[in-house]
Amino acid sequence: INEFREKQGIKSKFLHKNLLAKIDKYNQEVNELNLKPVEMGNYKFGTNKGNYMRFIASIQQTGRFPVGEWRYLIEAGKITGNVPYPILKNIRGKSGSAYGRYQFTVMNFNEYMADTYATLQSEVITNGIIFNNIPLVKKLNLREIAGLKIAGGSLSEHHTLLMNLPPSTSGLIKPYSEVSVGFTNLFGAISVQYTRRLTDTDKPATRKSSIGLSLMFSF
């Protein structure tokens, strides 16, 4: 998108204020609380000029329990002002088959844009409560993993007055969701997950499911 902005002559400047906090309470470890209450910018696109503000808050946490752990990332944001679409929030989809922990695995790249949004990306990893009961397989020390990812938001049609969205891009009419199941700790590092898309499965050129590999190290 940064390269696209340069080609289209879109320029913007930002002012950030970040607040980071680390919390350890009731054996729940909050890795990062990230607040950006002020992000002001201006753009120039052809003969159009404008100002906007972006508000973003996110929290990332790992919670441990007797048979495993739960990880999640929640992000919410709001963009005010009429802006061309490269400045809007691009809900992070993937174009390849690899699994991404904090990306939507079977959502197409640039499939959804939003000016108001909230996302949840979570996964639960258990300590072999199924695989440890299977002869021979238990020697591999595999761990079960399951995930749920949800994105919701809205997009004002005023933004298209400045620049039309690409044909394959739209706003979120209803919340997007996908689920995944699989195993990790193969050879101590490899994770294999099957991901299934639950919403907007009838859209053209949409992947309904995927099997992806990723590296996930455990210490």
Image (tube, grey):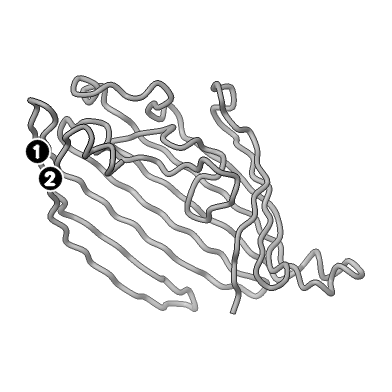
**Residue drawn 14% across the image and 30% down it:** 45
Residue 142: name its quadrant: bottom right
Circle 2: is it few (<14), some (14-19), or many (20+) Cα within 10 Å?
A: some
Circle 1: is it few (<14), some (14-19), or many (20+) Cα within 10 Å?
A: some
Query: With 81 as the anchor, is 194 left or right in this view?
Result: right
Q: Quarter of the image for the N terminus: give it.
A: top left
Residue under pointer 2: 41
Query: With 202 as the anchor, is 194 left or right in this view?
Result: right
Residue 129: name its quadrant: bottom right
What separation in Å lies between label 2 and label 1 (alpha carbons)?
Answer: 6 Å
Circle 2: residue type: Gly
Query: x, y percentage for residue 20?
Result: 27, 69
> Answer yes or no: do the residues labelled 2 and 1 have beta carbons within 8 Å?
yes
Residue under pointer 1: 51
**Residue drawn 48% across the image and 49% down it:** 103
Query: With 211 as the anchor, is 32 left or right in this view?
Result: left
Local secondary structure at mark 1: strand
Q: What residue occupies the far right of the structure in this picture?
A: 135
Local secondary structure at mark 2: strand
Circle 1: residue type: Asn
